[in-house]
Image: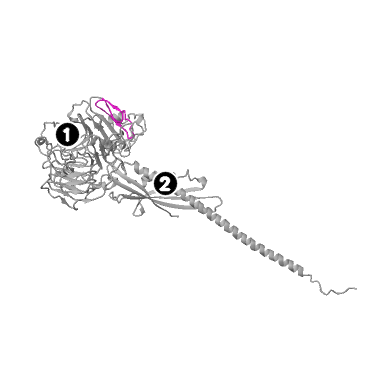
């Protein structure tokens, strides 16, 4: 018998319960998947961000490397130039450009693609082709380098693109920035009228006690005070009781800080090295076999054309080690290679020496030294013509023969193998007679110097002329005037020191510098009286670095007024000078003391009217004489990421 169940079977319960569990599991799975997906996405995004950040950090290293490369390139460009002191964008582009980017270090295989690597001048915060706000006394010029590249990395959809910029501060302080600059004490005691146009500075003490009218048109600064009296007891003339008060148009001398002198000319005369004996190393030939700490500033090293002369009757060994035959000379390129063949013969027509040893055309009787000076005559007019005709190339051709635009004396002749491709003329001429002794004195005479090698530095780095010598230098007649200047007429004291339209930068750097007017005659002898040596109005336009003989208790130095040595009767005549007068060292060869002016006894000159001015063209670094000694400093500035 079948009976009914008290609890009827609920057949759908289990199914519904099972379905709910599955649904919950599905929801949980979705939630977990979402969470895991979010975690994965977060990890993936973080990894990508970290990777991208690492790539940017690596890109920063690449930029820093590129900046350092650009810094070294600009520093080398600045240090190697002897004339173009302010590199423009065009000249820098030859050394810092996309082809010079550090692609061998940060390579395409590593994903680097370089878009920009360039350095340009900056003025007023704006990139320019070249600097034009020339203020050499301020002396700070800015450059910027721009670096731009992309970095592609596998599994990264978009490459990293970066652009950086860095500033460079270039400080430029040329030596020729004053009308008168003395590294030691400066004395002035002019007996006649004298006008100084331009700033005056001494790193020592200043002594001013003039009996004539002395006018200063600009500021005067001194490191160790100013004394309105002679330098006592070194000046044996004693105390001056009736000095004329100078006309200080910008005020009396004021104290200032020491002005740095270009070059590392620290003096050490106690060691065995003959190449580190002080500032006169600037004009000396380095002694072979000894360390030359002054090579970067030594004019012998910098000169594109070096001439070593022996005017004596016996063979002489030069400090360089070469043996120079009697009454002969050798020419060298910038790196010291001896020039032979046709070019040497041609140069001998520009730099003249006496083949006999007896011609008065190669002798000057120096009345201050009381000695005959045997001279090497530098014919500046012939140098100028040679440079214009292609006879003084910046680089000697590598061709077999002289071709193209060259003087007839060279055309078609063979070029000596040793000198092919050598760096040559750069506007710096070094000439020294190595046969000089205390009993047989030698020097260089600059003749026909009214016009110098032409050009402007923007187009030619060989414009102008710097002549350097270990010997005394004698400048005959107007120098670097372009002809007969209007100022020589005597009607204009302050202008027209050059022929209209003419300008070339120039300097003469020597043991001593004597100015001789165009009236000077080679026939003058020891018996020719001062009154018979009558000068003509003369104008000299060049910077000068020369030695002096300091007051020593037995003789007055002659003061800055006699820095330009004279040997004629200049009474009623005018000596006009535009340039920059610099004293860094004592004369070593021309050591006779200054003597009072006059025409009797052993007195050897009479005083001119002196009008001396600073050449303001020197404030423009692109118008300085070739090889001007200059303090140069390149400092790393700020850098920023632009993109």
- Callout count: 2
> Residue 29 sits in which quadrant?
bottom right
544 displayed left or right of 164: left
Q: Main secondary structure of the magenta part?
A: loop
- The numbered mark, 1 or 2, whose residue comes first in the sequence reads 2
Residue occupying image coordinates x 31% and y 47%: 172
Q: Position of residue 458 (x, y in %)?
A: 31, 45
Q: Is residue 159 magenta?
A: no
Helix, strand or loop status at disc 1: loop
| Residue corresponding to mark 2 | 68
- Nearer to me, 503 or 515: 515
Q: CA distance from mark 1 to mark 2?
A: 55 Å
Residue 328 shown in magenta: yes
Magenta range is 315-341
Q: Quadrant of the N terminus?
A: bottom right
Asked whether the viewer can see residue 447, the reply is: no
Q: Position of residue 497 (x, y in %)?
A: 19, 45
**532, above or below 163, in the image:** above
Q: Quadrant of the C terminus?
A: bottom left
């Amino acid at each position: 018998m079948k009976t009914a169940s008290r609890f009827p079977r609920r057949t759908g319960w289990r199914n519904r319960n099972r379905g709910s569990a599955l649904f919950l599991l599905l929801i949980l799975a979705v939630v977990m998947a979402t969470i895991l997906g979010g975690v994965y996405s977060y990890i993936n995004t973080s990894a990508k961000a970290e990777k991208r950040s690492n790539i940017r950090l690596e890109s920063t290293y690449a930029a820093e490397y590129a900046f350092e490369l650009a810094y070294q390139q600009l520093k080398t460009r600045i240090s190697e130039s002897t004339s173009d002191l302010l590199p423009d964008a065009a000249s820098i582009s030859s050394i810092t450009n996309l082809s010079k980017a550090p692609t061998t270090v940060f390579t395409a295989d590593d994903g680097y693609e370089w878009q920009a690597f360039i350095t340009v001048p900056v003025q007023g915060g704006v990139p320019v082709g070249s600097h034009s706000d020339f203020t050499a006394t301020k002396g700070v010029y800015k450059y910027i380098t721009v670096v731009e590249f992309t970095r592609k990395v596998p599994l990264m959809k978009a490459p990293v693109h970066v652009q950086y910029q860095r500033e460079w501060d270039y400080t430029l302080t040329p030596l020729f920035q004053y009308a008168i600059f003395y590294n030691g004490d400066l004395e002035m005691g002019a007996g006649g009228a004298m006008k100084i146009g331009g700033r005056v500075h001494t790193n020592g003490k200043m002594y001013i006690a003039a009996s004539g009218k002395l006018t200063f048109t600009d500021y005067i600064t001194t490191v160790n005070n100013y004394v309105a009296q002679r330098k006592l007891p070194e000046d044996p003339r004693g105390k001056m009781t009736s000095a004329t008060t100078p006309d200080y148009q910008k005020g009396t001398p004021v104290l200032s800080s020491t002005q740095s002198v270009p070059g590392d000319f620290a003096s050490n005369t106690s060691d065995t090295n003959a190449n580190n004996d002080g500032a006169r190393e600037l004009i000396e030939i380095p002694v072979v076999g000894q360390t030359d700490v002054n090579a970067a500033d030594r004019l012998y090293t910098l000169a594109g054309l070096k001439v070593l002369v022996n005017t004596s009757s016996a063979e002489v060994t030069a400090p360089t080690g070469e043996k120079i035959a009697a009454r002969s000379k050798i020419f060298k390129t910038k790196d010291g290679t001896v020039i032979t063949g046709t070019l040497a013969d041609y140069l001998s027509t520009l730099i003249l020496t006496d083949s006999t040893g007896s011609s008065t055309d190669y002798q000057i009787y120096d009345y201050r030294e009381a000695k005959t000076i045997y001279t090497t005559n530098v014919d500046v007019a012939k140098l100028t013509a040679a440079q214009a005709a292609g006879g003084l190339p910046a680089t000697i051709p590598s061709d077999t023969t002289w071709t193209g635009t060259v003087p007839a004396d060279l055309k078609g002749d063979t070029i000596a193998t040793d000198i092919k491709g050598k760096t040559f003329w750069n506007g710096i001429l070094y000439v020294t007679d190595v046969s000089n002794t205390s009993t047989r004195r030698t020097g260089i005479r600059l003749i026909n110097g009214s016009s110098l090698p032409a050009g402007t530095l923007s187009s030619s780095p060989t414009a102008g002329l710097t002549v350097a010598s270990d010997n005394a230098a004698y400048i005959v007649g107007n120098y670097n005037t372009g002809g007969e200047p209007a100022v020589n007429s005597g009607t204009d004291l302050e202008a027209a020191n050059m022929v209209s339209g003419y300008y070339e930068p120039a300097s003469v750097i020597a043991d001593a510098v004597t100015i001789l007017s165009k009236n000077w005659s080679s026939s003058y002898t020891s018996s020719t009286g001062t009154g018979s040596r009558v000068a003509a109005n003369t104008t000299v336009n060049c910077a000068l670095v020369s030695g002096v003989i300091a007051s020593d208790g037995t003789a007055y130095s002659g003061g800055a007024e006699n820095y330009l040595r004279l040997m004629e009767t200049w009474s009623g005549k005018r000596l006009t000078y535009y340039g920059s007068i610099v004293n860094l060292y004592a004369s070593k060869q021309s050591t006779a003391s200054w003597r009072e002016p006059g025409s009797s006894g052993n007195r050897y000159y009479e005083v001119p009217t002196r009008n001396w001015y600073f050449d303001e063209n020197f404030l423009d670094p692109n118008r300085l004489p070739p090889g001007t000694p200059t303090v140069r400093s390149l400092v790393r500035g700020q850098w920023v990421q632009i993109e």
